[in-house]
Amino acid sequence: MYISEKAKSISPSSTLAIDAKFKQMKADGIDVVGFGAGEPDFDTPQYIKDAAIQAIKDGKTKYTPAAGTVELRKAICKKLKEENGLDYTPDQIVVSNGAKHALVNVFQAILNPGDEVIIPAPFWVSYPEMVKLADGISVELQTKEEDEFKFTADEFREAITPKTRAVILNSPSNPTGMVYTAKELEEIAKVAVEHNIYVVSDEIYEHLIYEGKRASIASVSPEMKDLTIIVNGVSKTYAMTGWRIGYTASHPEIAKVMANIQSHAASNPNSIAQAATVAALGGGKEEIAKMKQAFCERRNYMVEKINSIKGVSCLRPHGAFYVLMNISQLKGHTIDGRKINTSDDLAEVLLEKAKLAVVPCSGFGADDFVRWSYATSMDTIKEGLSRLEKFIQEYY
Ligand code: PMP
Ligand code: GLU
């Protein structure tokens, strides 16, 4: 069959693949515990659901402008002003089918074939594939565990070539959970402005910070704001993963191009979900605080437990809802005739022997690690870690 070479080069999302496998095993009656896709286990708050029901009753069931309703884009500007101290106008906002779709639009809008995008590793698995879809080239900037997986301004500068168009900044980060300080952002911004490089600032986990303060690189200076493309959404903060609403805030010229692309590729995101998002952004402080508190307790337990198990270790993440577990000591071992060479090998054996689903980080540019999501109940977390402990005792 004739298939495009570019399409063939795109790998499936490993996070969604693990999640699908886990859900299938569960449906087959297997007692499996899952830490795959980063999806809050909480239900969407009732006031958001009510707004969606009201939107249906009010007939908000038609096409909206491709970039989103004016009402929602105004609500996003208000959020950016109140929470981030940033001034944007509705023509700078494009609402998409999740932050994932927003990111796809970004790279389609800013890249020419062969343009380079610096991606600090470990990175979220979808970034390189999105860059590839836009005919760009990903340049991995490897960070170190001892630096909390954060890159410095000097390392950034060294990775720049005449073809560098953008760098991705994901703080708090999936999968490391690390958060850049205001000072670190200032230093990175200085280099970006000096070299005229876009910063694609993925702020989807901005409300999930347990230590330290939220800061957007766009607020460093007006020059930096012009070069920043903020990507955000409601999936994580408001437990709205299935509603599929994300957005960008950028220079109006970039926003216009993204809206044009989206007008042909997808039209507007779901009109009812857009109305629900207006409600979401207008409230929910208590619900957010409650979820955050639960995530924080789970993180504390997970970090402590992992570091008490022989052969594995992890840093204490400061945000998001992931723990990156170092598995380098578990590699090189043979289990039932199978050599554990990679994080994929280990994840496979864990699934088979311990009925434990974690995400191998080969696709995240970090093969010495597997990722646990703690966006799941404390009982599940205790059970999963106890399975890991037993597995290591039995096979190592
Ligand atoms: N960015 C990061 C870092 C993520 O982990 C995710 C995963 N959901 C997204 C963007 C996309 O989120 P969504 O499409 O659900 O808004
Ligand atoms: N972003 C989440 C994760 O990394 C959800 C799955 C996905 O969209 O990749 O698990």
Image: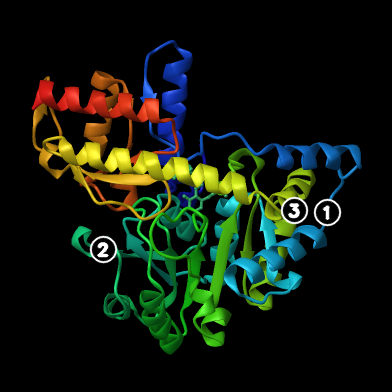
Amino acid carrying mark 2 in the image: Gln
User: Dot 2 lies on which element?
Assistant: strand
Q: Is residue 66 above or below residue 52?
A: below
Q: Amino acid at mark 1?
A: Thr
For ligand 1, tell me if the residue under mark 2 lies within 8 Å. Answer: no
What colouring method underlies this structural image? rainbow
Q: Residue at x 29, y 74 (%)?
A: 152
Image x and y of residue 336, in percent: 12, 19
Question: Which is nearer the eye, 65 or 2?
Answer: 65
Q: From the image, tell me which residue sits under label 1.
A: 64
- The extreme bottom residue here reads 194
Instruction: Please say if 59 is above or below 384.
Output: below
Name the quarter where the C terminus is drawn: top left
Which residue is nearer to you in this view: 9 or 364? Answer: 364
- Residue 334 percent across, percent down from the top left: 9, 28
> Which comes sooner in the sequence, label 1 or label 2?
1
Residue 335 in sight in this render: no
Q: Is mark 1 within 8 Å of ligand 1?
A: no
- Report the residue at 74% width, 46% height from top: 276
Vertically, is 24 above or below 170? above
Question: Label 1: how many residues lie within 10 Å, few (<14), some (14-19) or many (20+)?
Answer: some
The residue labelled by disc 3 is 278
* Mark 1 and mark 3: Cα distance apart in space: 14 Å
Q: Which mark is residue 142?
A: 2
